[in-house]
Amino acid sequence: QVHLVESGGGLVQAGGSLRLSCAASGSIFVINVMAWYRQAPGKQRELVATITSGSSTNYADSVKGRFTISRDNAKNTVYLQMNSLKPEDTAVYYCNARGWSTRITSFETWGQGTQVTVSS
C-alpha cells in the first residue's frame, strides 16, 4: 500500500503565500506522476498541477504564473508553492500519486486533503 500525507494548508490573506507538502510512503517502486487537485464547496474536483518523475510540469490556466509544483524524488515528496493567492483559490487541496509498487502492480492514491482558505 502507498499512503500520502499532506501538510501546509491554512488561512491566509489575499496576496499571500502558502506552501503545501505531500509525502508518500509505503511499498513504492516508482512514482511516475504526482499532482495536486482542489475542490471548492459545491464544485467538482479540479486539477491544479502535475509533475512527472522527470520534472515535467503542467498547470491549470487559473494558477499559471502564481503556483509552482516541485518534487524531491529521493523523499517521494511533492510540493506546491502558492503565491499571490486569491479568494477563489479557497478549497480543499488533495495530493495524488500514480506509479508502481514494489510488487510491480500499478497504484493511484490520494491524500486526505488539506484546507486552504484565502480571505479578501
Image (cartoon, grey):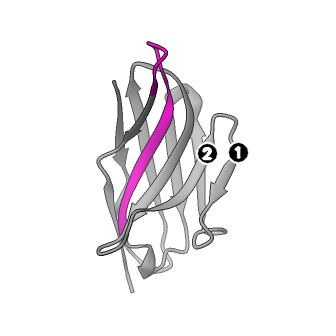
Nearer-the-camera pick, 110 or 44: 44
Name the image quarter holding residue 120. Answer: bottom left
Percent position of residue 116, x then y: 36, 66
User: In the rendered structure, which amino acid carries the disc numbered 1?
Assistant: Ser
Secondary structure beneath disc 2?
A: strand
User: In the rendered structure, which amino acid carries the disc numbered 2?
Assistant: Ile
Q: Is residue 60 magenta?
A: no
The answer to whether 77 is drawn above or below residue 101 in the figure is below
Going from the N terminus, do you reach mark 2 or mark 1 first? 2
Q: Is residue 34 visible?
A: yes
Percent position of residue 80, x then y: 52, 54
Looking at the image, residue 48 sits to the left or right of residue 10; the answer is right
The magenta stretch is: 91-106
Determine the residue positioned at 49% across, 15% down.
104
Q: Disc 2 designates what residue?
A: 51
Percent position of residue 76, x then y: 50, 31
Q: CA distance from mark 2 to mark 1?
A: 5 Å
The answer to whether 113 is drawn above or below residue 41 in the figure is above
Q: Disc 1 designates what residue?
A: 56
